[in-house]
Amino acid sequence: MGSKEFRKEMEKRTKEFALSIIKLSSRLPKTLESNVLRYQLTKSGTSIGANYREANRARSRAEFKSKMKICESEASETSYWLELLSDLDQSNYEDLRSNLPESNEILAIFSSVGKKLNSSQSKL
């Protein structure tokens, strides 16, 4: 897969993930504690795709690297919130069965890209 195809596939994948996070968040219990988790999860889970899209339209290598680091950070944060929900049993198993592994895969991808960016001068 070439870099253009990779970018398009990741934009699609992160958008689908954001939609899945929004759906999961809407099904969380309506408690004060869940409201905090809902807000944090929705914020970080939707930020991944938005920042990735911005990275692909960056005007400089520095801007691209900065946005990619944000993607990695937001993916890590999203995994954290999903792990908390899982540990608290705040969401049904079906919601977490797809979202937590996908979050971890997206994090692994952005971590790998980050390492390549630090060791190379090419733009993905």
Image (spheres, rainbow, N blue to C red):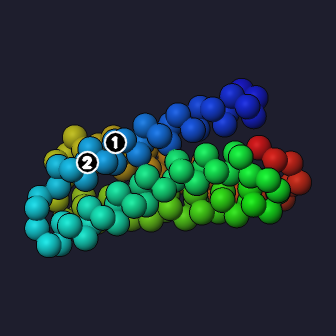
Q: Nearer the viewer, residue 90 or 12?
A: 12
Q: Is residue 68 above or below residue 14?
A: below
18 horizontally vs 24: left or right = right
Which numbered disc covers residue 20?
Answer: 1
Tell me the SS state at disc 2: helix
Q: Is residue 81 visible?
A: no
**Residue at screen point 69% across, 28% down:** 5
Q: Residues within 10 Å of mark 2 (few under 14, many from 20)?
A: many
From what the image shows, is residue 91 above or below residue 97?
below
Marker disc for residue 24 = 2
Q: Is residue 42 left or right of residue 73?
A: left
> In the rendered structure, are the residues bearing label 1 and label 2 in contact, judged by CB atoms less than 8 Å apart?
yes
Instruction: Tell me where residue 114 appears, x and y as whole percent.
Output: 70, 57
Can residue 21 be seen here? The reply is yes
| Tally of marks | 2
Q: Is residue 104 above or below residue 98?
A: below
Task: Check the image and report above or below for 23 versus 91.
Answer: above
At label 1, the amino acid type is Ser
Horizontal side of residue 103 vs 37, given as left or right:
right
Question: Residue, x 42% and y 54% (percent of image)?
Answer: 45
Q: Quadrant of the N terminus?
A: top right
Residue nearest the observer in this picture, 37 or 99: 37
> Residue 82 sits in which quadrant?
bottom left
Q: Position of residue 6 (x, y in %)?
A: 67, 33
Q: Position of residue 117 (x, y in %)?
A: 78, 56
Q: What kind of residue is marked 2?
A: Leu
